[in-house]
Image (cartoon, helix red, strand yellow):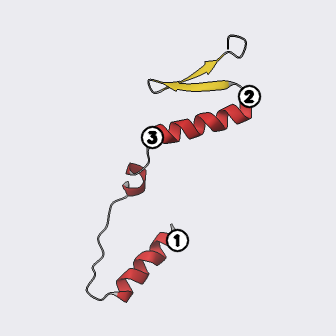
Amino acid sequence: MGNSVLTIIYHLLSDPERRFHDLGAEHYQSRINLDRKARNLATQLQAVTGQKIVIRNGKAIVIDSDSS
């Protein structure tokens, strides 16, 4: 957050013609790729639990290691 504010200030001061344009509170949230986020979280969960986790149709499924 602090880095974003400093970047905004730098650009506003370095170019007098430039005007501040607020992108909104949800700007960074809207840029998140939800599929990639789900895969990353599944990988982290696998590392913690040792279970095989697969994402299918937007749901996390635990694969029994005995059936593989």
The crowd level at tag 3 (other Cα within 10 Å; few <14, some 14-19, many 20+) is few
In space, the residues marked 2 and 1 are separated at their CA atoms by 37 Å
Asked if the residue under mark 1 is in contact with the one under mark 2, i.e. CB atoms within 8 Å, the reply is no
In space, the residues marked 2 and 3 are separated at their CA atoms by 23 Å
Label 3, secondary structure: give it: helix
Residue that label 1 marks:
2
**Residue at image location 52% in from the left, 36% down from the top:** 38
In space, the residues marked 3 and 1 are separated at their CA atoms by 25 Å
Residue 34 badge: 3
Q: How many numbered discs?
A: 3
The first of marks 3 and 1 along the sequence is 1
Residue 27 badge: none
| 51 left or right of 20 in image | right
**Residue at image location 44% in from the left, 48% down from the top:** 32
For badge 3, the amino acid type reads Leu
For badge 1, the amino acid type reads Gly
Residue sitting nearer the eye, 20 or 60: 60
For badge 2, the amino acid type reads Gly
Quadrant hosting residue 51 = top right
Above/below status of 14 relative to 59: below
The first of marks 2 and 1 along the sequence is 1
Above/below status of 53 relative to 11: above
The crowd level at tag 1 (other Cα within 10 Å; few <14, some 14-19, many 20+) is few
Q: Position of residue 42 (x, y in %)?
A: 60, 33
The first of marks 2 and 3 along the sequence is 3
Residue that label 2 marks:
50
